Amino acid sequence: MTIHSGKFVFLVLLLMGCRSPSPSSDPVPSDLEPGYTPGTAEECRRLHAALFEDAATITASQPPASFEAPHLPLEAGLNNRLRAFLERQCYKLPGWSGEDGVHLTGTPTQGSSHGWVRVWYSPEVSAWLQRGRPEKEVPEQAIIIKETFRPIGEAKEEGGVFKLVAWQPMIRRPQDSRDGWFWSDIAQDEVRHGVVACSRPPMAWTSSETLRLDNCRPFNGFGYQVCLRCHASQRDFTFAQTTHLPASTGGTRARTQTIYDYRRVWREADAQNPDNHYDDYKNQPASTYIAPHPDRDTIPLALGGANPEFVAQYGLPADESAPSEDIPRFFDHVFAKAPQQQPDTFLTSDQCWSCHSGVGHIAQGLAGAGSLLARDGELAEGTPRYADVSSYGEWSVSMMGLAGRDPIFRAQREWEAHHREDCADDITDLCYSCHGAAGQRQLRLDAPSRKFDHAMVSALADAPDGKYGALARDGVSCSVCHQMSGKDLGTPASYTGNWTPTAPDDVQGPFSADVRADPMKRALGKTPSGEGDRSQVVKSSALCGSCHVVKLPVRKVGSCTNERFFFEQATFLEWRNSSYRVNDAFVKDEGHAGATPQRCQDCHMPKSFAGSPLKKKIASIEDTDFPTASIPGAPDVHMGVELVERTPYSRHQLNGINLFALSMFAQAPRVFGLADYDYMSNQHGEPTRLQMKTALLSGRAFADASAAVEIGVPTVNGDHLDFTVKVTNKAGHKLPSGVAFRRAFLEVSIEDDSGGTLWASGRTNGAGAIIGHDGEVLASELDTLAPEPHHQVITREDEVQIYEERIADSNGKLTTSFLGLYQPLKDNRLLPTGWKSTFEPLLENGKLPEGLAPHGVDGDPDYPADGSAACGCDVVTYHVPLSAISQHARVRARLHYQAIPPYYLRDRFSVPLPDARRLYQIASHLDTTSATSVIPGWKLPLTEAVRPSREVSGARR
């Protein structure tokens, strides 16, 4: 909307008399900041008008978004105009109301939200305040500017110094967003020295620092949650008040803080050198004054050159070029529209980030229930450290939060679409119904005839499909799970990502009582509620089942014709057919729960940290524990936001044991657009463990708890040493579970007294391929016709027990295509405890359908076909010739896991496609050799057992 200049001049002239009897149009000299050239009234009028031009005009004045500058042009344009307005000190013109001086926000006992500030109000705000702050009547074109100061030395004493370091303006533009304000945080460097962001030098594997991405988050925007996390608790989103204004402009003088005249305490030298006392900020990019986090060096970065063993294994040349980069996550920005516009059902996670992050609570510090941090040992003696257990903090580094940026998924989708070009559009749309669920679903809501296109994930903010790209890059985001309705949940109608969303204003949570909805309703136009059965949706495993049951059409090679359907993955159904089943509003199997009931959420959303139960608030927002912010004549600012502490408090850890993909994100975060720290919880080297480090440690702990290995008593029988190895699945589903190409395998070795290996089954090379006695890769590793068979007895080193699902295509060749699962050849994945072949709720024509039943296990009693309950285990007998192990001393058994085994990667690399090449670039540089790698030797150790081999019952030793 274009400003009416005559109206503005009239207001200025009207209020000038209240401010000063002087007819001059110049700012009051005592208010000017040294080092700035004040604007004239006419110049400031133009700069003011520029702030309120319509969105289209401002956007047109900006260059379009680019990968180097992906900021939404409207927001970038407004911020540029604000910088000019501030540089000319236009907010100090007569007619504006400025507070008497610098004061501390908050209280000494309750903490401070913004430190030392001085606030300025435009004539529109002043008039609104004089009218008693009538709700929902903040005028258009209102501006509030908060100057923030840094005390130098003892600023409270005579001769002390307050230095201006930043401005935090609020610009009233109700036509552009739900809350109606443009928010900004502009450092003095931006205005005085042009330092606006950290740089991104060209990425190179040989330069470790270029693999990291500094948090170049724009500190401005619509729906800017850094500000809204507190301001949404107040009606009209502002704490504006007359308390500290001079009496001549309506000040009440009922001050809660001591006021310091910042002009009085400035030294004369500051007028001559405006950068005095500012050396640690002046002319420095952000990365140089944000301290490196202590955890940065404990996460290995990718290798400076391709792993030669990896390169040799796949017969491809080393590719040392930099892979293509994703748009940085902090530019995924779909905010709530203005009330008069049609609302989007889904918003990006940055709209949830700030309130649900691990920022230290202003009043409670790092240890309080409102901080969403958990005590995590010490950085040093007497210096506690914390882990971010906030919803956003843990979700953001989970495979749910990273699903839309997953390079393995992208290579798989690309391969499927390439090999079935006639239905490539349908394939891509189907894939993104889970991996980019919010983007795919919002597109379906907006344009039902359109299908999601993979190019959308690279769409910039101002592109026609930019909204859908940002939502898809956000993965399985906050709004996906919390706006999934209960309609058909837990039934086949909801599988394969076919769930039904709630209404745009409806958010479902786990709590049925004491839900404080006002802040979210004000800021996002969404009302959180868990009343009645609504709280059961996010508590039920059926919610997880909507994407963790994938039933896909079976098609011949190259064909788009459906022959039948096959369960490509069925983790939720595996859980239902186990002793862990929990019946609820959406799961009603056999009329009772399993013998040891646990929901998906009980494992993947734990309620404790380091063994201690958590008791936390669900958000860190402006609530009753914040410093007093009472405003004369206005309702209590904290009314309706008395957050209660929740116990149990469920963490959004949401990880399994795919530490292969997680290592890619951790070792080359810049490739995926990930800053290696979160601005809210640990940007300044605070004692908060980096979220990615917590995720890797949590995944490691998850792996440790997923299985157990037990070695039976070794026995000499004739000229052989016999023993058993029992593997027990401790997960609530098959192990492995999920996509069909994952596998676990046993490495069993016999050692001498010094630990030397005499005999081994299941050894691997440095690239994770299983090798035999001669060190050569087993034929079954790369065979395209037959997998390694299931074993009940192993006698040779080239026989290995591999727990996996292998399927042939219509040509009889082993395949990793999700749409070519034509003929099952092997499925000996470890069953969950309590699994039954006759589980009635899942039977089709009297038997379990393909994809749910074991295959190729040759009558092994550990995979019962008679309807009896499975032990959730497998026992393998080893029959080893003594001639090969005459000096045997012990038996060692290890269970390993691979999320992307060699045969899978071979298939992806077989066709030179862009995402396949990108996966090769990343995987070949993955550090699997350093002491801190969680996947040493391209495998994830799950469990291990050792037993002396001389505990024999036979006579011969």
Image (cartoon, rainbow, N blue to C red):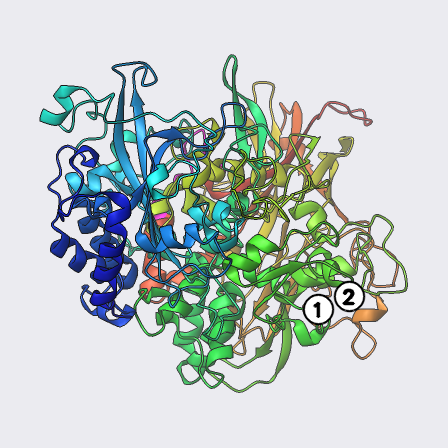
Judged left or right of residue 815, residue 170 is left
Residue type, numbered disc 1 = Gly
Write down the residue under mark 1: 486
Q: Residues within 10 Å of mark 1 (few under 14, many from 20)?
A: many
Camera-nearest residue between 881 and 858: 858
Residue at image x 43%, y 50%?
Answer: 129
Residue at image x 68%, y 36%?
Answer: 615
Q: Position of residue 294 (x, y in %)?
A: 40, 26
C-beta proximity under 8 Å, tags 1 and 2? yes
| Image position of 7 with respect to 602: above or below | below
Q: Quadrant of residue 323?
A: bottom left
| Image position of 356 with respect to 339: above or below | above
The span from disc 1 to disc 2 (Cα, nearest Å) is 8 Å
Write down the residue under mark 2: 586
- Look at discs 1 and 2 and give the one toward the viewer: 1
Quadrant, the C terminus: top right
Residue at image x 26%, y 44%?
Answer: 19
Residue bounds of the magenta highlight: 924-935
Q: Position of residue 236 (x, y in %)?
A: 48, 55
